[in-house]
Image (tube, grey):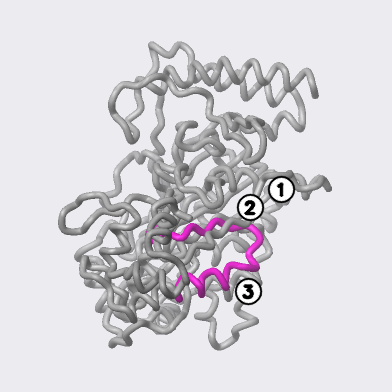
C-alpha cells in the first residue's frame, strides 16, 4: 500500500496541475477575470498543519491496483492534449425509458447526467421548488412556473454548481463523481405515485420518477457503484428523507447489495410549528405547513417511508417533517439546515420585506432557532449555521460557510470517512467533526453566512447593519445580557 500511495501522490500532483491549467481556459465560475491556476484543493486540519486532498475517488485503490491505474489512464486521456480539447463540464439531458412516468402535465420525466469514467461514486440530486396541493393553485403554478411541472422546454445541457460542480476548487470532495440532476416537475415534494385523472388534472409521480431514474442509471454504470449519495435541496431535501430508504430497498431488491446508499438533505428539515399569524389556507405561502401537507398528501397520492407510516398511521403527513421521519430512516443521512430558514419563516408568516420587524416577530425568529436546535440535537451528522438563508449545497459559495471553523465540504468528507471506518471496524478519525451547530442566538451571527443585501438599495449589509435593519435594539439586548452595549457590538462584529 505504501508504494501505491507514493505513486498515486505523484500522479495526482501532475494530473491536478494539468487539470487546473485546462479548467482555467474553459471555466465560467464566480470570477470571470483571468487568474492564476488554483493549487490542488486542500484543507488544513483544525489542529496542526496536516493537509488532506480530495482529487480522486480512491475506493478503487483499496481493492486493487489495476482498477486504480484504469482511473488514472482514463483521467489522463481526458486531459491530454489540453490545447486540442474543450473540457466538457455539462450534464446532458436524458428522458426516462419508461415514458409512462411523467411530469405533472403528462410530458415524460428525465434527468441530467455527467458520467465520470473510473469513479464508483454517484451523486443523484433532487431539485426543489415548493409544491401545489389542489387544482386551483396547481393551475396557477402551471401558468407561472411551468418549468416545474413540464419537461417540454428543458435545456439539453445543464452546468452543475456547488456539490454538483466538476471543478475541484468549488467541489473538493465530489468533483470526480458521476453527477445526476433530476429536475423537479411533480410538485409533490417527491412523494407522489398517482397518474393523471380528470379530478386532479395532473399527474403526481415524484417518488416514481426517482425509482425510474435509478433503474435507468443501472445500465449506465450505477450497477458498478460503491457509494450512491441521494442529495437534494428544499423540497428536494425533504424528498431525500422520504426516498433514501426506498432507493436502498430498490437496489437491494434488484440484487445490487454492494451499493452503499446515503442521504444528504439540505434545507428540507421543516417544522410543523404554529404560525406567527394564522391565515386562511389559500396557497402554499399563506397555508400552515401541517395543513398544506394534509391536503397535499391526499391530492398527490403521496408515499411515505413504511416504518414512518406505521408509526403515524392515519396521520402520515407527519412523515414530511424531518424530526418526525428521521428516527425511522435506516440509511445514513447528513442534514444541512440553516437555523433561520427563509422558507420556514415564509410559511410561518414572517415577512422580511425591508421593514424593521416588530418585537414579537423578533422573539418568534429567535425561538425558531431554538426549536430547530432542539430537533437537531440527536441527529449524528449535521451542519446548522445560524444564518438567514435557504439552500446551500448547490450554491457556489457552499465552501465558504463554516460552523466552529469547519466548512461544509470538510464536514461531509469527515462523515464519509467515519462511515468507511465504521464499516471496517476502525476508530472514527480525530479532529474531524460531523455534528456542527451554531450556538449564537441571532440570524447571521455567524460571520461566514452568505451576504445579505438591502432589498431596496441592493447594497451589502454587515451583521450589525442587518440586525439594526430588522429592528434589533442593541441597548435593550445588552441590558438583557448584562453587558456593556459597546462590548455587545464588538461581539456581533466578530461573530462571537
Q: Mark 3 points at which residue?
A: 306
Answer few, some or many: residues within 10 Å of disc 3's Cα (few below 14, many 20 plus, some between 14 and 19).
Answer: some
Circle 1 or circle 2, nearest the eye: 2
Callout 3 touching callout 2 (CB < 8 Å): no
Residue 386 counted in the magenta span: yes
Q: Name the residue under label 2.
A: 434
Q: What is the C-alpha distance between the residues marked 1 and 2?
A: 9 Å
> Between residues 154 and 75, which one lies in front from this camera angle?
75
Name which of mark 1 and mark 3 comes first in the sequence: 3
* Residue visible at 80% across and 47% down in the picture: 427
Q: Residue 418 carries which label?
A: 1
Residue 332 counted in the magenta span: no
Q: Residue 304 carries which label?
A: none
Q: Is mark 2 on a helix, strand or loop?
A: loop
* Residue visible at 65% across and 71% down in the picture: 327
Name which of mark 3 and mark 2 comes first in the sequence: 3
> Between residues 141 and 256, which one lies in front from this camera angle?
141
The location of residue 61, given as percent across then percent down, is 72, 29
Amino acid at each position: 500500500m505504501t508504494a501505491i500511495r507514493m505513486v498515486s501522490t505523484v500522479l495526482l500532483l501532475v494530473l491536478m496541475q494539468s487539470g487546473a491549467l485546462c479548467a482555467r481556459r474553459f471555466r465560467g465560475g464566480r470570477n470571470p477575470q483571468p487568474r492564476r491556476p488554483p493549487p490542488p484543493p486542500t484543507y488544513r486540519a483544525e489542529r496542526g498543519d496536516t493537509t488532506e486532498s480530495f482529487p480522486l475517488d480512491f475506493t478503487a485503490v483499496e481493492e486493487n491496483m489495476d482498477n486504480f491505474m484504469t482511473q488514472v489512464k482514463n483521467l489522463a486521456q481526458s486531459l491530454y492534449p489540453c490545447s486540442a480539447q474543450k473540457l466538457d463540464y455539462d450534464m446532458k439531458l436524458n428522458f426516462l425509458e419508461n415514458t409512462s412516468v411523467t411530469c405533472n402535465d403528462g410530458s415524460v420525466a428525465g434527468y441530467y447526467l455527467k458520467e465520470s469514467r473510473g469513479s464508483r461514486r454517484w451523486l443523484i440530486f433532487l431539485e426543489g421548488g415548493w409544491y401545489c396541493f389542489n387544482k386551483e393553485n396547481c393551475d396557477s403554478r402551471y401558468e407561472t412556473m411551468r418549468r416545474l411541472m413540464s419537461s417540454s422546454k428543458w435545456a439539453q445541457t445543464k452546468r452543475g454548481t456547488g456539490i454538483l460542480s466538476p471543478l475541484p476548487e468549488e467541489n473538493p470532495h465530489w468533483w470526480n463523481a458521476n453527477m445526476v440532476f433530476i429536475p423537479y416537475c411533480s410538485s409533490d415534494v417527491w412523494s407522489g405515485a398517482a397518474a393523471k385523472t380528470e379530478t386532479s388534472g395532473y399527474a403526481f409521480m415524484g417518488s416514481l420518477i426517482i425509482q425510474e431514474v435509478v433503474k435507468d442509471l443501472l445500465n449506465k454504470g450505477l450497477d458498478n457503484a460503491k457509494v450512491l449519495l441521494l442529495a437534494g435541496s428544499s423540497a428536494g431535501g425533504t424528498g431525500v428523507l422520504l426516498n433514501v430508504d426506498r432507493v436502498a430497498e430498490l437496489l437491494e431488491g434488484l440484487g445490487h447489495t454492494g451499493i452503499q446508499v446515503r442521504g444528504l438533505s439540505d434545507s428540507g428539515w421543516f417544522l410543523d410549528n404554529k404560525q406567527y399569524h394564522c391565515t386562511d389556507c389559500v396557497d402554499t405561502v399563506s397555508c400552515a405547513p401541517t395543513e398544506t401537507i394534509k391536503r397535499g398528501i391526499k391530492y398527490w397520492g403521496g408515499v411515505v417511508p413504511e416504518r414512518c407510516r406505521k408509526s403515524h398511521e392515519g396521520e402520515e403527513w407527519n412523515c414530511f417533517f424531518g424530526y418526525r421521519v428521521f428516527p425511522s430512516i435506516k440509511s445514513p443521512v447528513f442534514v444541512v439546515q440553516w437555523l433561520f430558514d427563509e422558507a420556514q419563516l415564509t410559511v410561518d408568516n414572517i415577512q422580511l420585506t425591508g421593514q424593521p420587524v416588530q418585537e414579537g416577530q423578533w422573539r418568534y425568529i429567535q425561538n425558531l432557532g431554538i426549536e430547530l436546535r432542539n430537533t437537531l440535537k440527536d441527529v449524528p451528522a449535521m451542519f446548522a449555521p445560524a444564518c438567514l438563508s435557504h439552500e446551500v449545497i448547490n450554491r457556489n459559495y457552499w465552501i465558504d460557510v463554516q460552523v466552529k471553523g469547519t466548512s461544509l465540504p470538510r464536514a461531509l468528507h469527515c462523515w464519509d470517512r467515519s462511515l468507511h471506518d465504521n464499516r471496517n471496524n476502525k476508530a472514527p478519525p480525530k479532529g474531524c467533526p460531523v455534528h456542527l451547530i451554531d450556538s449564537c442566538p441571532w440570524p447571521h451571527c455567524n460571520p461566514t453566512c452568505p451576504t445579505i443585501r438591502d432589498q431596496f438599495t441592493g447594497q451589502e449589509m454587515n451583521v450589525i447593519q442587518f440586525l439594526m435593519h430588522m429592528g434589533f435594539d442593541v441597548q435593550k439586548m445588552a441590558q438583557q445580557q448584562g453587558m456593556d452595549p459597546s462590548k455587545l457590538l464588538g461581539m456581533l462584529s466578530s461573530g462571537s
